[in-house]
Image (tube, helix red, strand yellow):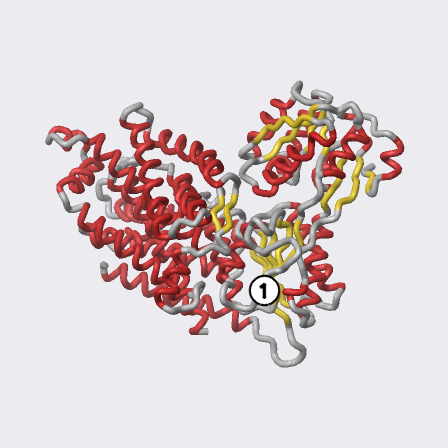
């Protein structure tokens, strides 16, 4: 029994690390920039598609994963441009990118699905380096952990630089940031690009882990990312950049753990989405209800 | 991390430890005959996939592997969410079952990836192209622990059937979701074979069930008849929209599965998903009896001709009596 529970925790830990990248991406746009970017559902399979196609054509899997990250940067940049240059509302810009990327992903893959089952993926490379059998959970966790740590270190540094601080301030008070002489449009572009780059990176890793890229694999990513962010914020009161990033990854881990447990208890997977929705509502509503009870001032609901 | 948060997190972890152990304790059967554990997964709920699953269970029962007696089935369905599909695959492998049945391409791919390094036999079904999907090395050869039943069918009988019912057809339309591998492969095959039958192909694609009606309408006036591949979007949930288009515009529509034809199409050569499931069930029985999976190459689907004269009338077609007499299934 301990063995089984250990397996569940290990697998959720791996998933938490990978989907934590999606959650960080969602955090950057939704929370830091106050830019509700829905292109995530399209950039996740975009990263998967780019990595899969490159790996099948013989490119080194690490290089392919890096290219996937860059494809996400590009897509995020486009979403940002739609908003800042063409003045499309943020929600609409994201939805449009999501729809457009569906076609783009089909074109990239030349079909709906690219198999990686018999290809050498980054996981196989890591397995070779560590001398473990590929497909073991230790290999999956090692690769995911290394990627997560690299992303963590870079973001932890970047968000404290002058550019990073301006980016964070843009979401808080755009007018003030502009008054201080920082170009908020540039900050939004940068934030969207990094966010979608991370999501595409996660897509590339997931595709290699599960053995295929599929045009439908982005379904529900945005909800999952949001749920992770919200759970993480509730569990780890984030103050400061490092704890904030940690909180989001913890949120992703707990969310995946919930799903894994729900599945193993024999819950109908069709009901999972509703449970996620209820979970998000509860976590979002609790602080509000608490304030109401204490008769504190309640800020108006965000309308975006 | 705040103290409360830490407390909550450790609470969740404890709950995880307890809860995940529970089903296993319940699953213990005291002594007696060996109870085989067979896991079944399909990517989503769909009439054809459900028949496929039922076929597996029925064929295994026929062969003496009866649920509740000597077989325990663990059935899970991620309802289209691929990250959940991966969780299910990992769960199945952790159960160390005697066999995994994976219905549809993505389900089979996640299971095969999760089972890498183990020797759990995996049987796929309703996978159109298992070679491109990377499941088996070729149509003649099973992978060391993977084989199964494809729903791939020859396109020639489909075209012959259309020509028998409507000899004058010159332009044949097709509607499908380009996001579904199965459907895209069939559409490509259709384009390849059409010239041999003197046919020109026009295509319409629908990305979701909401687009099917528009896709169908776009074919009106551009073709003499329509043929629909085994596509979950157009041939599955969206088939009613196509029937509406066909009946309102006297455009004869042919199908490739009994499920869609009996909803109201002229007819077609059908893949029988229940039959596919049964073949997968028979393979399962052979493997549970100790046969090596490597000796069982993948199987292609057989087709049977189906006609629906009343529905054909509604689309302005009278099916020749000879065709009705020769059909395997006539829907009244």
Q: Residue A24, percent across and down?
A: 30, 48
Q: Residue B87, percent across and down?
A: 47, 57
Who's the residue at 49% across and 43% down the image?
A216
Corner quadrant of residue B154: top right
Give the camera-side residue of B7 and A173.
A173
Q: Residues within 10 Å of mark 1 (few under 14, many from 20)?
A: some
Q: Chain of mark 1?
A: B
Give the camera-side residue of A50 and A17.
A50
Q: Is residue B294 left or right of residue A15?
A: right
Which image quarter is the C terminus of chain B in?
Answer: top right
Does residue A274 appear in the picture of this structure?
A: no
Residue lying farthest to the left in this orientation: A180
Check disc 1 and report the residue beneath it: B144
Corner quadrant of residue B251: top right
Which image quarter is the N terminus of chain B in?
Answer: bottom left
Who's the residue at 40% across and 59% down the image?
A123
Q: Is residue B94 left or right of residue B102?
A: left
Q: Is residue A129 left or right of residue A175?
A: right
Who's the residue at 40% across and 30% down the image?
A96
Residue B254, relative to residue B290: is it above or below?
above
Does residue A178 appear in the picture of this structure?
A: yes
Q: Residue B187, percent across and down?
A: 62, 35
Mark 1: which secondary structure? loop
């Amino acid at each position: 029994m301990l063995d089984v529970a250990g397996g569940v925790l290990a697998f959720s830990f791996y998933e938490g690390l990978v989907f934590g990248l999606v959650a960080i991406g969602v955090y950057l746009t939704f929370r830091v920039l106050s830019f509700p970017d829905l292109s995530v559902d399209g950039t996740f399979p975009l990263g998967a598609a780019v990595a899969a196609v490159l790996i099948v054509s013989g490119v080194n899997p690490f290089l392919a994963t890096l290219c996937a990250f860059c494809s996400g940067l590009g897509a995020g940049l486009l979403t940002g441009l739609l908003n800042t240059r063409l003045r499309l509302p943020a929600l609409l810009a994201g939805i449009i990118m999501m729809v457009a990327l569906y076609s783009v992903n089909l074109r990239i893959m030349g079909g709906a699905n690219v198999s990686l089952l018999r290809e050498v993926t980054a996981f196989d490379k890591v397995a070779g380096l560590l001398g473990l059998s590929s497909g073991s959970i230790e290999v999956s966790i090692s690769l995911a952990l290394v990627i997560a740590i690299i992303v963590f270190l870079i973001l932890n540094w970047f968000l404290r630089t002058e550019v990073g601080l301006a980016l964070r301030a843009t979401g808080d008070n755009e007018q003030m940031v502009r008054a201080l002489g920082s170009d908020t449009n540039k900050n939004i572009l940068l934030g969207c690009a990094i966010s979608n780059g991370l999501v595409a990176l996660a897509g590339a890793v997931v595709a290699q882990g599960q053995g295929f890229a599929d045009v439908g694999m982005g379904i529900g990513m945005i909800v999952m990312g949001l749920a992770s962010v919200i759970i993480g914020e509730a569990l780890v009161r984030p103050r400061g950049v490092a704890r904030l990033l940690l909180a989001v990854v913890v949120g992703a881990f707990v969310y995946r753990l919930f799903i894994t447990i729900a599945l193993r208890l024999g819950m109908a997977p069709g009901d999972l989405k509703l449970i996620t929705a209820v979970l998000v509502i509860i976590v979002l509503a609790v602080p509000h209800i608490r304030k109401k009870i204490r008769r504190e001032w309640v800020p108006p609901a965000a309308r975006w | 991390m705040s103290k409360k948060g830490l407390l909550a997190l450790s609470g969740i972890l404890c709950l995880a430890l307890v809860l995940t152990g529970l089903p296993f304790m319940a699953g213990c059967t005291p002594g007696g005959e060996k109870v085989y554990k067979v896991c079944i997964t399909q990517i989503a709920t769909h009439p054809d996939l459900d028949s496929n699953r039922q076929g597996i269970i029925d064929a295994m029962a026929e062969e003496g592997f009866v649920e509740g007696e000597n077989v325990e089935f663990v059935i899970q369905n991620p309802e289209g969410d691929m990250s959940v599909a991966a969780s299910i695959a990992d769960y199945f492998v952790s159960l160390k079952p005697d066999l995994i049945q994976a219905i549809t391409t993505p389900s089979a791919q996640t299971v095969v990836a999760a089972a890498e390094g183990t020797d759990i036999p995996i049987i796929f079904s309703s996978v159109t192209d298992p070679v491109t999907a990377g499941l088996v090395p070729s149509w003649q050869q099973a992978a060391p622990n993977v084989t199964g039943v494809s729903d791939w069918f020859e396109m020639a009988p489909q075209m012959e059937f259309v020509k028998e019912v409507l000899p004058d057809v010159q332009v044949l339309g097709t509607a499908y979701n380009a996001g579904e591998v199965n459907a895209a492969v069939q559409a490509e095959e259709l384009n390849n074979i059409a010239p041999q039958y003197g046919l020109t192909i026009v295509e319409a694609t629908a990305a979701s069930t909401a687009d099917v009606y528009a896709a169908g309408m776009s074919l009106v006036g551009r073709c003499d008849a329509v043929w629909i591949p085994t596509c979950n979007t157009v041939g599955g949930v969206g088939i009613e929209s196509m029937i509406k288009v066909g009946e309102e515009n006297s455009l004869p529509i042919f199908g490739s599965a009994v499920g869609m034809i009996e909803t109201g199409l002229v007819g077609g050569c059908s893949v029988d998903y229940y039959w596919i499931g049964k073949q997968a069930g028979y393979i399962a029985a052979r493997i549970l009896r100790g046969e090596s999976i490597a000796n069982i190459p993948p199987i292609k689907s057989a087709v049977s001709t189906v006609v629906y004269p009343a529905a054909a009338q509604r689309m302005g077609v009278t099916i020749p009596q000879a065709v009705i007499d020769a059909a395997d299934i006539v829907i009244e």
